[in-house]
Amino acid sequence: MLYLLEILFALSPSYVVRFSFGALKLNLLEVLIPIFWILALILLSKKGELDKFFSFCKSIPKSVLIFTAIFFLASLLSTLISPTKDRAFGQLLAYFVEPIITFFFAGYILREDHNKNRFLKFVLYYIALLSVYALIQYLTLAGLPKLWWGNSAEPKRALSIFEYPNAFALFITPLLAYSLPIVFSGDKKNKHLKWLLLIGLFGLLVSLSRGGWIGFISAIFVFALVSAKKDLWKKLGVVAVLVIIVFSVVPNLRYRVLLPFKGEKSTVSRFSLWETADKMISSSPILGKGLNGFATDFNFYNTDPGLAPLDYPHNIFLNFWVETGLLGLISFLGLSISIIWLGWQKFLKGSLYGLAIILFIIALYAHGMADAPYFKNDLALVFWIFASTVI
């Protein structure tokens, strides 16, 4: 069944393929996920493993099940109070129902370390392919929309197969962070993975996503701190010097780093977004505004005439508070803490995948301080697939 999960993961960006079925608006990923469930159940039935699968689901740590249940309940309440019920129902399906159900299947498939190892290799090869295309875009402009060729407001940025550069960075950053312990495990069988990681880092670099850079740097720092290997610190020191040199020499990169200190519109807009979200939360601190509430009520609360409407406040805490209320925020935080705790316990017992999921969460939150790392079809699915690896 592992190959089914690999195919589903590879097709996670297919949410950009949208179509209508009568009055129902769908995207390709929303259709592929139930197909994955059906095929997985058929295979489980043929192998006589259905009872084993359901026993596995019951064995999942209670803290994870409880916070997942509360998180799902919060999403239901947020759908009911949403100012746009039809759109909220679509988001309920795409961001909560489908990813959470997939979590149980992914956990069963990836419960053995050898399956995790094979899956991670597949993920890194996939990221490398996405990043090669991003590098081609950046160097030749082939396949790169004119909007991202570079202008007075934005420098040239690559987006690979995604709709915009930050979508590319949001997808690969936590995955690259997750791979660090396994790539640097010293296992000769995984030696080639370092090259895949490097290619992925070049992809992240040319996305020019500062949030992605910060997310990955945060994960590296924690990884080096936990590993406590002198040779790793030396290597990171050398890499840090090289990065500083590259950023100093390449105008686009230097320009991207310095922009926030010059009152760049993108940076300043974050403060306006957070202020708008704060007003919404103040008006409804317990329930929030419901799914799609921020985008719908934006014009009623925004006081910055230069700020274009956006779907989310671009802060992981504000995103969940506005969209899913205090219950959604607390349950997601509780789930994240549970995952980190379980990951730490596994790491202490010798599992590098325990540390991997911790780095995944750290990168997600660090990047999420200035972006929306969950509320997108592929991001929600990837979060729950990788969260399952801690079980």
Image (cartoon, rainbow, N blue to C red):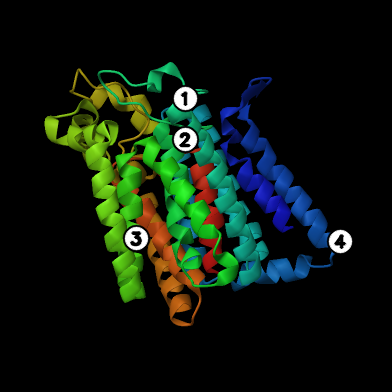
What is the secondary structure assignment of the residue under circle 1?
helix
Please report whichever mark, 2 or 1, sits nearer to the chain's N-terminal start: 2
Cα–Cα span, label 2 and label 3: 23 Å
What is the secondary structure assignment of the residue under circle 4?
helix
Q: Amino acid under label 4?
A: Lys
Q: Quadrant of residue 32?
A: top right
Q: For this rendering, which residue is in front, 231 or 279?
A: 231
Placement of 25 over or under 57, stated as above or below = above
Please report whichever mark, 4 or 2, sits nearer to the chain's N-terminal start: 4
Disc 4 and disc 3 in contact, CB within 8 angstroms: no
Residue that badge 2 annotates: 135
Disc 3 and disc 1 in contact, CB within 8 angstroms: no
- Horizontal and vertical percent position of residue 312: 35, 34
Residue that badge 1 annotates: 140
Q: Amino acid under label 3?
A: Ile
Judge whether residue 81 can be spotted in this image.
no
Residue occupying the far left of the picture = 262
Q: Quadrant of the N terminus?
A: bottom right
Residue that badge 3 annotates: 220
Cα–Cα span, label 4 and label 1: 49 Å
What is the crowding at mark 2: few (fewer than 14 residues within 10 Å), some, or many (at least 20)? many
